[in-house]
Structures are given as structure tokens and as C-alpha cells.
Image: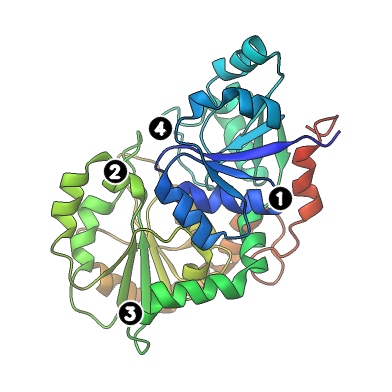
């Protein structure tokens, strides 16, 4: 039976749009958001997706029960919601979790533990499944969906390229190489490198320096974030541009820490420079690029080691395939739409 499904992006988390909206597009299902900003961003960057804004979801539970059989979100579903739909509306609702990026986080703190409480989960590939097994997390039913965001980028490449050119690259010097720094947020693992690093990049150099801000860096402490970034003059901050692949396609090098964006970079096999945290073990991703030290001149380290970047390409291809599946040409164009659409068939496929 083909289930009636809906995607959700609740709360102000704009970074989740580039994960849930492409999935909604591929599945041809509506996307419900709760914030005006997300409604506007979805209409701008994912215009083919039917997006609705419901500001108070608690008043729409009956409508959800009447219209849909399966709900997908990039946040963990609370276990009591399933019982709520059953008790109030005699509805068996399937609540599916979609991860928002592949990363190596979760070994220091139980970030991935709620996987075990979902009705079903979407996995990009074998690496995430292996991580859950290593953490002794018994996952429920799941689908392997590959890199659905890469598939979306391939389908809408020209539109997304034009948006990136207009909103980002038109402000840069085309004669200079471009570095993208994409730090993670200050999660329970304390894995961000942002607070020790960003001022290092704020210096005159021969590089265009882009910093793609994780929204939670500013949302969790907006006063501190504004104070720290007010003096930035030599970098270009990217804050409200959810698509990541049209940025990665154009850059010459990547600087990151434990952010899932590093796994996205693997699709392009670009020079990667990685910052580790002394309080955390090295990530798998750290084997795919040159490690740099935040207490030294970062741009000098990057410039000095650019020539070594090609040495990591075999490792980058290998890790990409573990994370997302087959890597054909650049990025895995073999992602199968029909396989992803099996999400809508409960039967024996889940």
C-alpha cells in the first residue's frame, strides 16, 4: 500500500532544510514548517516542494491524522506521539527519522541513542549502520537511501548554481582561490572549532575566505555570536543559504572539524584541512585530509600543504562509498529514485 506521507521541519532550524526539502521533492510529498523564515527559504531554494506553514502544530493534530499515514522529520520523534495519535484519533501513524548529515559525532556522548526509539530510520549507507552497531544501539526498521541530497543537486544543478553565484560568489574576487570553513556547533561533544579559529581567518590574504555558519552557533548565544563576528572584515559569512553542494562545487579548499559538511566535500575530492579537538578522538574524516593546528597560522598551513591534497583522494573516495554507496564519476549519480520512494510503501519493505 502506498502511504500518504508528509515531511516536517519544525522550529527555527534552517540548516535542516537542505536535508528534508530534497527528500520531500524526491518523494513528491508536502513539507510542513512552523517558522516564517523556513517557509520563505523553502520557497526560494526548493520552489517545486509544496510547503505549508502551520505555526501551532498542536492545533493541527487531527488534520495530520486525517491527511497522512507517515511523517518524516530530521529531528527525533518523541515516543509518546505515536500513542497520542492512536488514543485521540485511532490512527496508526508511522514516525520516521531522517538524519541531517553523516558525521563521526556520537562516540563521546549518546547523541545517537534516540535512533532506537523511532518507528523507522533512514540511513545513507553502511557507515551509519556500522556506527550504530559500534555504539550498541538497536535500531528499528530502516531504509538505505544513499545520498539523496546529491541526487537533488544533480537534478536542480543549474538553478542552485545560479543562486550560489548571485548570493555568494559574485561578492568574491574571481582571481583568488576560495576557502570554505564550515564548523559544527557547540554540541554535547563540545566539538566545534569556531571560537578558537574564526579570528585566525580574519586577516588579509590571497584567499577568498567563506565561513558557513552553523545556525545553532548563533541561536544558542546570539549576543556572544554577534559580538564575536562584528569585527570580521576579511571573510564572507554565509548564514541563510541552506544548499551546500553548489558551494562545495566552486571552492578550492575546505577547512572543517567534526561537521557533517566534511562528508559532503568527499563527493568532490577537494583539498581538505581538518581541525581536531584534544578532548575528542580523531574522526574517520580526519584521515581524508591534512590536519592543521588552530594555534598556528591557518592560512599559511593551508597554502603550504595544498600540494599534498591529491594524496588523500583514494581515502576520500573510499570513505564516501562507505558513507553513501557507489561513487560514479563525482558524487554517486547512481542514487536510485525508485529505491528512495520505497519509503512510502510500508508492507514488508520497512
Residue displayed at 19% across by 68% down: 202
Point out the frontmost of discs 1 and 3.
Answer: 1
Q: Nearer the viewer, residue 148 or 107?
A: 148
Q: Are marks 1 and 3 in contact (CB under 8 Å)?
A: no
Point out the frontmost of discs 1 and 4.
Answer: 1
Q: Are marks 4 and 3 in contact (CB under 8 Å)?
A: no
Please report whichever mark, 1 or 2, sits nearer to the chain's N-terminal start: 1
Numbered mark located on residue 108 in the image:
4
Q: Nearer the viewer, residue 203 or 11?
A: 11
Which residue is labeled 3 in the image? Answer: 171
* Image position, residue 6 (x, y; %): 65, 39
Point out the frontmost of discs 4 and 3.
Answer: 3
Q: Is residue 150 left or right of residue 247?
A: right
Residue displayed at 27% across by 39% down: 220
Q: Are marks 2 and 4 in contact (CB under 8 Å)?
A: no
* Image position, residue 345 (x, y; %): 81, 36
Task: Quote the CA–CA distance across marks 1 and 3.
Answer: 35 Å
Task: Quote the CA–CA distance across marks 2 and 4.
Answer: 23 Å
* Image position, residue 267 (x, y; %): 58, 64
Name the residue furthest bottom: 175
Amino acid at each position: 500500500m502506498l502511504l500518504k506521507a508528509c515531511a516536517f521541519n519544525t522550529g527555527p532550524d534552517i540548516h535542516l532544510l537542505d536535508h528534508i526539502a530534497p527528500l520531500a521533492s524526491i518523494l513528491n510529498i508536502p513539507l510542513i514548517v512552523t517558522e516564517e523564515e523556513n517557509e520563505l527559504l523553502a520557497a526560494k531554494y526548493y520552489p517545486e516542494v509544496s510547503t505549508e506553514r502551520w505555526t501551532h502544530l498542536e492545533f493541527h493534530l487531527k488534520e495530520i491524522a486525517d491527511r497522512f499515514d507517515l511523517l518524516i522529520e530530521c529531528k527525533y520523534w518523541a515516543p509518546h506521539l505515536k500513542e497520542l495519535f492512536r488514543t485521540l484519533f485511532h490512527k496508526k501513524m508511522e514516525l520516521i527519522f531522517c538524519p541531517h548529515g553523516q558525521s563521526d559525532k556520537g562516540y563521546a556522548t549518546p547523541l545517537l541513542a534516540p535512533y532506537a526509539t523511532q518507528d523507522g530510520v533512514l540511513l545513507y549507507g553502511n557507515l551509519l549502520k556500522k556506527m550504530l552497531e559500534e555504539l550498541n544501539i538497536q535500531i528499528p526498521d530502516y531504509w538505505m537511501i544513499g545520498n539523496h541530497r546529491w541526487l537533488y543537486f544533480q537534478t536542480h544543478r543549474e538553478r542552485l548554481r545560479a543562486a550560489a553565484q548571485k548570493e555568494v560568489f559574485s561578492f568574491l574576487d574571481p582571481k583568488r582561490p576560495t576557502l570554505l570553513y564550515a564548523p559544527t556547533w557547540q554540541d554535547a561533544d563540545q566539538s566545534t572549532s569556531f571560537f578558537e579559529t574564526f579570528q585566525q581567518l580574519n586577516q588579509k590574504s590571497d584567499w577568498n575566505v567563506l565561513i558557513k555558519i552553523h545556525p545553532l552557533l548563533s541561536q544558542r548565544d546570539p549576543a556572544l555570536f554577534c559580538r564575536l563576528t562584528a569585527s570580521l572584515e576579511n571573510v564572507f559569512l554565509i548564514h541563510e543559504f541552506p544548499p551546500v553542494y553548489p558551494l562545495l562545487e566552486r571552492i578550492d579548499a575546505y577547512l572543517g572539524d567534526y561537521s557533517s559538511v566534511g562528508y559532503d566535500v568527499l563527493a568532490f575530492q577537494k583539498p581538505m584541512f581538518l581541525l581536531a579537538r584534544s578532548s575528542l578522538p580523531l574522526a574517520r574524516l580526519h584521515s581524508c585530509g591534512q590536519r592543521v593546528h588552530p594555534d598556528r597560522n591557518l592560512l599559511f598551513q593551508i597554502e603550504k600543504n595544498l600540494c599534498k591534497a591529491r594524496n588523500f583522494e583514494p581515502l576520500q573516495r573510499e570513505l564516501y562509498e562507505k558513507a553513501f554507496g557507489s561513487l560514479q564519476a563525482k558524487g554517486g549519480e547512481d542514487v536510485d529514485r525508485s529505491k528512495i520512494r520505497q519509503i512510502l510503501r510500508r508492507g514488508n519493505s520497512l
